[in-house]
Amino acid sequence: MGIVTNQGDDGFTGLYSNGERVRKDHSLIEYAGSLDELDAFLALGEIILKSEGSSLFAGIIEEIRKQIHAGIMPFKLQELPLYTGWIERQIDLLEKENPVHNFEHSWTKKGSAVLNVARTVCRRCERHFATAEKYGGRKNPEAEMLVWLNRLSDLLFLLAVSEEQRLR
């Protein structure tokens, strides 16, 4: 099958989970598009972090991207509690090294700035998923996705702060 299918030319697309045809502005499509955008910014962040010598943080981003590709993008959500636990452990470690006392920061490094953009895209994913969950009739275990996205945005913020401080 080629990339051109002509299936979306009418403004509709198929849901990944069951193939149901929905409008391209459906909340689940908005969510999936935001998640795709998040993955793109995470990839950019991973490349920048590696180039700036932050292999530890790049490794964390690489693991997040694996979680997205292995369990979240295909809507195989049974692994989400494990992924959330891993993110919470990373948060605990980063908070011990770089305690955050406020949420106002100036991003002056490429890596930290891209991580902050990824954080804002993650928040958008969370809003889109909350809408899809509310209006699309989605029930557990999908509700765990909101927890995962919330923790991920916290982790991305802490990574941005830590990267900013690492390069000072």
Image (cartoon, rainbow, N blue to C red):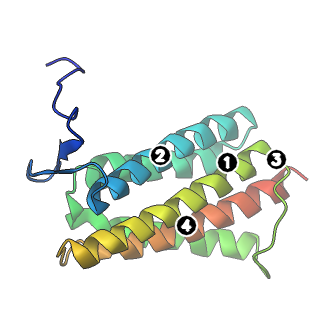
Residue 75, image quadrant? bottom left
Left or right: 47 as drawn, with respect to 167: left
Q: Name the residue under label 4.
A: 153
| Residue 103 versus residue 41 in the image, above or below | below
| Residue 94 versus residue 110 in the image, above or below | below
Residue at the image point whose x is 52% and y is 66% from the top: 123
Give the amino acid type for the residue marked by disc 2 in the picture.
Glu
Q: Which residue lies furthest to the right in this view?
A: 168
How crowded pointer 4 is (Cα within 10 Å; few <14, some 14-19, many 20+) is rated as many
The alpha-carbon separation of the residues under discs 1 and 4 comes to 13 Å
The alpha-carbon separation of the residues under discs 2 and 4 comes to 14 Å
Are dots 3 and 1 in contact, CB under 8 Å? no
Residue at the image point whose x is 53% and y is 39% from the top: 43
Q: Name the residue under label 3.
A: 109
How crowded pointer 3 is (Cα within 10 Å; few <14, some 14-19, many 20+) is rated as some
The image shows a total of numbered marks equal to: 4
Residue at the image point whose x is 14% and y is 53% from the top: 17
- In the structure shown, which secondary structural element does the residue marked by tag 2 occupy? helix
User: Which of the pair 25/168 is nearer the observer?
Assistant: 25
Q: Name the residue under label 1.
A: 114
Left or right: 38 as drawn, with respect to 161: left
Which of disc 4 and disc 2 is earlier in sequence? Answer: 2
Front of the two marks 3 and 2: 2
